[in-house]
Amino acid sequence: MIEIRGKCGTVCNTCSFKDRLGCKGCEAQQGKIFWGECDVYKCAVSKGCQHCGLCAQLPCQQLLDFIENGHNPDRLPNLNRWKNESQ
Ligand code: SF4
Ligand code: SF4
C-alpha cells in the first residue's frame, strides 16, 4: 500500500475518519478537515516541510500537544520512521 502521508504523521488512507466523514486526506483537503483548520498543517506549510518528520524542530510542543489530544497514537512513530527514511 502506498501511504498517503499527513503532515502530523497520520497515514490518511488507514484513518478511520476518512471514509466515515468523507475526508480526502491531508494534502487534498489542504488542512481544512471535518473539525476545522489544522494548525499543524499550516505550521508545516509555513516551514516548507512535506510533513513534520522533515522539520528540524520535531517533536515540537505544539505537535506533542496535538498528538496527545488526538485519536492516533501512531503519529510520532510514523514521523520518526519517515524522518529516518529521508536520511
Ligand atoms: S490532522 Fe492536520 S496535519 Fe494531520 S492529517 Fe489531518 S489535516 Fe493533516
Ligand atoms: S514546528 Fe512542530 S508542528 Fe510545525 S512543522 Fe515542525 S514539528 Fe510540525
Image (tube, rainbow, N blue to C red):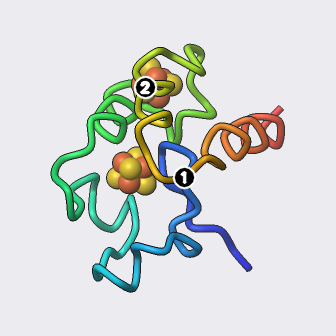
Q: Residue at x 27, y 35 (%)?
A: 39
According to the image, label 2 marks what residue?
Answer: 65
x and y percentages locating residue 55 in the rendered image? 56, 24
| Image side of residue 57 versus residue 42, left or right | right
Image quadrant assignment for residue 23: bottom left
Q: Percent from the top left, x then y, of residue 64?
A: 50, 25
Q: Secondary structure at mark 2?
A: helix
Q: How far across and down, in percent of the image, does residue 20 sit?
A: 35, 84
Residue under pointer 1: 72
Asked if the residues shown at circle 1 and circle 2 are in contact, with their CB atoms under 8 angstroms apart, the answer is: no
- Figure quadrant of residue 32: bottom left
**Tag 1, which secondary structure?**
loop
In the displayed structure, would residue 69 be above or below residue 60?
A: below
Report the residue at 63% width, 34% height from top: 53
* Amino acid type assigned to the residue bearing label 2 in the image: Asp
| Amino acid carrying mark 1 in the image | Asn
Instruction: Name the residue rendered at 65%, 68% in the picture.
Output: 3
* Mark 2: few/some/many CA within 10 Å (<14, 14-19, 20+): few
